Image (cartoon, helix red, strand yellow):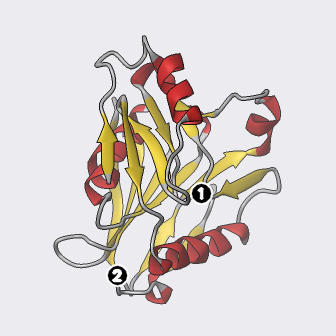
Amino acid sequence: MSALPADPAPGQYWDELLRFWQEADWPEGSKVEIIDGVIVVSPPPAAPHNRIAAKVQRSLYSVLPKDWEVYQTLGVTHPHRGRLFIPDLVVVPDDVLDRIEGGEHVPLTSAELIVEVTSPNNASYDRLNKAAAYAEADVPLYLLIDRFAPAGPTVTLLGEPQDGVYQELQAVKFGEDIHLPEPFGLTVDTSVFPFGP
């Protein structure tokens, strides 16, 4: 993973930072995000990472309202904070995308659920930077699937953001069920998640 420093006041220079993000020749297949005004380039995720995201996505389809969708690789922005994230999964109502014009990105504040699956090179971003950013944007639920947690693979559901801080709603080890509350009302079976790197 590499990072390109940006101006310490990203909101002021957001258009230039975004233009550089759009026009640069990034390595094919890499994931390029803007995290707190810094462009972060990560290699493509490994097969177990993608398999976990696919399992969660398949589960979500069984409970989503017809006018909501779950996306992989959808950029969500928080411009005044210098952020453009590409979550592993993000649930957004259709009407949000209907209102997006041209090159506009989806506002982070419109996400109903974000799912991140850690990789060895991004785990700290997912645990700290992104958790804080998602809470600050009042994203109702954040499901962190931490394959590389120090105590072993865990799944943590964060929610009820207040003053930019999430409450831990539930935390389980791989192999145990985790329940997403309404409007999802979904129990995710983590025993289907691969344990290996």
Whether residue 108 is visible to the viewer of this picture, yes or no, is no
**Where residue 75 appears, x then y in whole percent?**
59, 43
- Please identify the quarter of the rendering in which residue 104 is found: top right
**Regarding mark 2 in the picture, which secondary structure is present there?**
loop
**Regarding mark 1 in the picture, which secondary structure is present there?**
loop
Q: Is residue 42 above or below residue 135?
A: below
The residue nearer to you, when weighing 3 against 184, is 3
**Where residue 21 appears, x then y in whole percent?**
51, 34
Q: Is residue 7 above or below residue 127?
A: above
Pointer 2 residue: 197
At label 2, counting other C-alpha atoms closer than 10 Å, the crowd grade (few under 14, some 14-19, many 20 or more) is few
Question: Mark 1 and 2 residues: CB-CB less than 8 Å, in contact?
Answer: no
Residue shown at 33%/25% (left/top)? 6
The image's mark for residue 122 is none
Residue furthest to the left in view is 150
Q: Quadrant of the C terminus?
A: bottom left
**Where residue 111 appears, x then y in whole percent?**
59, 42
Q: Earlier in the sequence, mark 1 or mark 2?
A: 1
Whether residue 117 is visible to the viewer of this picture, yes or no, is yes
- Please identify the quarter of the rendering in which residue 28 is found: bottom right
Q: Is residue 134 above or below residue 163?
A: below
Tag 2: amino acid: Pro
Pointer 1 residue: 182
| Image side of residue 110 versus residue 168, left or right | right
Q: Disc 1 vs disc 2: which is toward the camera?
A: 2
Separation (CA) of disc 1 from disc 2: 32 Å
The residue nearer to you, when weighing 27 against 75, is 27
Q: Quadrant of the N terminus?
A: bottom left
Residue furthest to the front in view is 25
Residue shown at 36%/86% (left/top)? 195
Tag 1: amino acid: Glu
At label 1, counting other C-alpha atoms closer than 10 Å, the crowd grade (few under 14, some 14-19, many 20 or more) is few
